[in-house]
Amino acid sequence: MPKLVFSRHGLSEWNALNQFTGWADVDLAEQGVEEAIAGGKKIKEAGIEFDQAYTSVLKRAIKTTNYLLEYSDQIWVPVEKSWRLNERHYGGLTGQNKAEAAEKFGDEQVHIWRRSYDVSPSPMPHDHPYSAHGDRRYAKLDQSVVPDAENLKITLERALPFWEDKIAPDLLSGKTVLVGAHGNSIRALVKHIDGLTDDEILEVEIPTGSPLVYEFDDNLNVLNKYYL
């Protein structure tokens, strides 16, 4: 039975400070490390054995993936990193405190930016300290695909090719796959896998520290879905 485990990274330093993070490469907070270790132990207790792991190119997800594998005694499992699994890019909101942004722009506008499916925040200028343009991680990409701001719709559009080219073929071959990623990149793929509407996905939250398990039939129809 093909099996897929999603795990959102543990609490990051900016999560703890209530700041918009997106593509900023922020480390795990101490609590986030503990959550990732706990997730690895849950995977071990569940007896889930991976053949392949995937993660983003942001260290909070990379470290979480490493902890999950280490504490489930599977540190040897191959890990592939891709920008397509990065968190949603929060544009000009990146680095701002969420409460302060609500005071500046209004609660309703910030809520629309955060929770709507297809509305993006203002784009990040290329000379912004957190711009992905000029970052060596993305130097080989066509700069037209490097975002300055994203919504969930755009996040799904850039994550979906990775699902189709990497994750789905692995599952169809019977592999058990770990994806250590971010709240919104996981939500985007959950929308696709579960066939959710644009409105339904707005109600979905992906918790930290609780691996999400999908079990599929041989045609990748979902048979079971649960959190560890």
Image: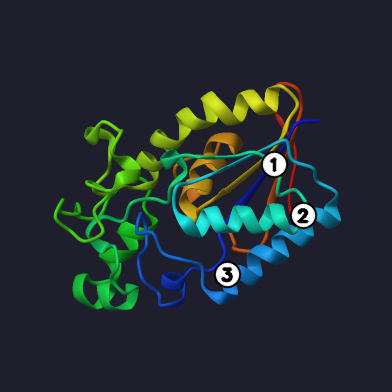
Q: Is residue 65 above or below residue 34?
A: above
Cα distance in 3D space between marks 3 and 1: 22 Å
- The one nearer the camera, 189 or 69, is 69
- The one nearer the camera, 116 or 9, is 9
| 3 and 2 marks in contact (CB < 8 Å) | no
Q: Under tag 2, what secondary structure? A: loop
Q: Quadrant of residue 36?
A: bottom right
Image point (72%, 22%), residue name:
173
Residue assigned mark 3: 32
Residue 228: percent from the left, percent from the top?
Answer: 75, 57
Q: Is residue 82 left or right of residue 178?
A: left
Q: The residue under label 3 is which amino acid type? A: Gly
Residue assigned mark 1: 77
Which one is in front in this view, the residue at disc 3 or the one at disc 2? 2
Where the N terminus falls, by quadrant? top right
Q: The residue under label 2 is which amino acid type? A: Ser
Image point (31%, 56%), residue name:
90
Residue assigned mark 2: 72
Residue 56: percent from the left, percent from the top?
Answer: 48, 46
Q: The residue under label 1 is which amino acid type? A: Val
Cα distance in 3D space between marks 3 and 2: 17 Å
Point out the tag, 2 or 1, that comes first from the N-terminus. 2
Point out the tag, 3 or 1, that comes first from the N-terminus. 3
Q: Is residue 154 left or right of residue 215?
A: left
